[in-house]
Amino acid sequence: MSLYLGIDVGSVSTDVALIDPRNGLVAGAYLMTRGQPIRVVQEALDEIAAAATVPHEISGVGTTGSGRHLAAAIVGADAVKNEITAHAVAALARVPDARTVIEIGGQDSKIIILRDGVVVDFAMNSVCAAGTGSFLDRQASRLGIPIEEFGTIALRSKNPVRIAGRCAVFAESDMIHKQQVGHTVEDIVWGLCQALVRNYLNNVGKGKEIRPPVVFQGGVAANAGMKKAFEEALGMEVIVPGEHKLMGAIGAAILAREARPKPATSFKGFDVARQRFVSGGFECSGCSNMCEVTEIRSGDSLVARWGGRCGKWSS
Amino acid sequence: MRVTFPRMGNSHIPLRALFESAGVEVVLPPPSSRRTVALGARHSPEFACFPLKLNIGNFIEAAESGADTMVMAGGIGPCRFGYYAQVEREILADMGFDLEMVVLEPPCTGWVGLASRIRKITGGCGVTGLLRAARLAWVKCGAVDEIESVSRKARPVERSRGAVTRAMEEALALLDDAGTVTAARKALAAGCEMIWSATGFPVDDPEPIRVGIVGEIFMVLDGFSNMDVERRLGEMGVEVHRFLSMGEWVRSNLLPKSFMPHEAREMVALASPYLNYFVGGHGVESVGGVRVYARLGFDGVVQIMPFTCMPEIVAQSVLKNVSRDHSIPVLTLSLDEHTAEAGLQTRLEAFVDLLKRRRVMKAAGRTEEGVTPL
Ligand code: SF4
């Protein structure tokens, strides 16, 4: 069967998805980037290769996320698209009449407004990390509860406490204060979910017309407390697709499929997982910009180079 | 006296011409670089806006190369810019630099003050000499605007990426070297020729997506601080336009009212149903500008501002309604020294994708709520 591979390299997590020609998920992998994007892409490819049991042939590869150019260079990609397009396309594949996409990942969050299957507006958080996956992880570990249980604990709350969610620092200190005053963990966790949703709607979603169906995706969508808080705040149902964690990669794979016709895929094969890539860099002295140029090498050959402001170093 | 002034896009070309032909020695700060940002950010208050940090960096680097007099513009109105010159002087004095600061307050605060400050710098140069210098500077100012504008048109159709930008740099260097008005005019003509031929004269001319730029003038004009938004958009095949330019600024702020460009008046007039109050900087023009672009049938608008810029934040909140009422998408970029290039690129790409898809949808005659044809 001819399958399509999508890779989403974010700063916190990296996900890879293998889809069939009808956009169904064949195999997926979700790993932490840990500041080593090349290694993690290789590991994820290994996992996918092992998980894909059906005989297959890769007909296209797409990459997205902040590491999309890097990933494209090491695996050989047919489509390199930004996160907004990838997430929108994936949401539409799961909920064809979706009109709003809420996406909250490890380090950033975004809102995408769709009308008639087309992105008509979007916004991304720019400054505040409150509400993103990393922040929730930190609060969970500070409260001593596993992140997987965070959501279900929130749902047990009887008396919500109001947490100041304006910014991550305030939210944290306010939580500590509420704990000291004696509120229960359930109530605090639920209060936090509500605060983060308020923060999201005020910062990222500000001024956007949120209409149903609303699709909630990204790592944070696993959190049942956040889903419920969104539903309460918006007064409408919020749909969390089963593959909510892999939507970026699924979108990239779909975009690769749509990028045809092309004579053949540029995919270099799953063997790249065994290749040794070395990333390095240097400061260009071509002009006063002194750009930091990054390069990826494999053995003696240069795989990719980018980073100059003038375009002199991009292929 | 060795005069210096901060960098802002290509404004050093006319400014240098102005001072040098009036017989003043100029020490240009080296082009802004990562070092400039690092120096400026280290010695400026964290909450100051990005232009101040860059100014400080420029002044430090100019002082290192021997400048002893700084020329800085002043300002009036609710925006912080008005006291930046004073803040900068104090910061540099605290750092132990022995620099004199000459603040050129806008002429609406009094021509006499401005004239006496100019005399202070130009010293021995007589009135005729001054007028001749001003004329050369004005011609170069117009030429810079023209070269930039031609490049914005040429970039989306260039055959090999980066060719237009390289030709533009050459054209600007040619202009910078010109010592007389005649030479400057020749340099302009030759430069524009170079830029067009750098496109490789594409034959099939698809209609590119058109995007207008509004925002805070320093960030809009300074490609270094806006991370080359114009070039990035151009290289995605977008034709970029902006009303803001040095020439426009001089006409609107230094010359008598009758010289004010038509578009500038229109921008103020069109802003009034949404924002009928001077909020400082170009806040009002940003609001009106979006309406002008909507009228001209542009596909979208990018608003550029330094992080924490008050006038533009006011404009931004109003722009939500303007954008909805006129069905024109507006992307706001709020930038400073912490801005990551990857994030900026993502926003721009997503914006351009959005505009392309909208156009396809409109061509297909599909209109639904919120997306009516312009
Ligand atoms: S990469 Fe280009 S812009 Fe950057 S320092 Fe080198 S020559 Fe200058």
Image: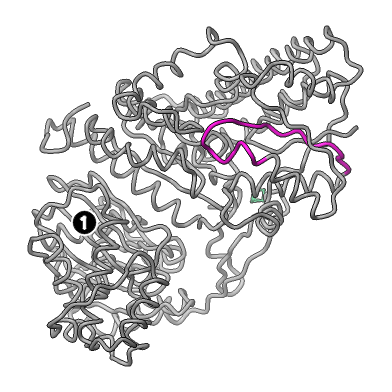
Residue B80 falls within the magenta-colored stretch = yes
Q: Quadrant of residue A197?
A: bottom left
Q: Residue at x 65, y 41 (%)?
A: B84
Q: Which residue is mark 1?
A: A89
Q: Which residues are magenta?
A: B66-84
**Secondary structure under badge 1?**
helix
> As drawn, is A54 to the left or to the right of B186?
left
Q: Is residue B80 left or right of residue A120?
A: right
Tell whether position B99 is magenta.
no
State the residue at coordinates (70%, 13%). B186
State the image coordinates of residue B273 (x, y, percent, origin top left).
Answer: 29, 25
Observer-nearest of A5 and A123: A123
Q: Where is B165 relative to B49, above or below?
A: above
Q: Is residue A229 left or right of residue B163?
A: left
Q: Position of residue B260 (x, y in %)?
A: 52, 13
Q: Residue at x 25, y 61 (%)?
A: A251
Given residues A248 and A149, the one toward you in this image is A149
Q: Is residue A245 visible?
A: no
B40 sits to left or right of A137: right
- Please name the amino acid that badge 1 sits on: Val
Comparing B1 with A38, the one in front is: B1
Could you tell me if residue B203 is visible in this image?
Answer: yes
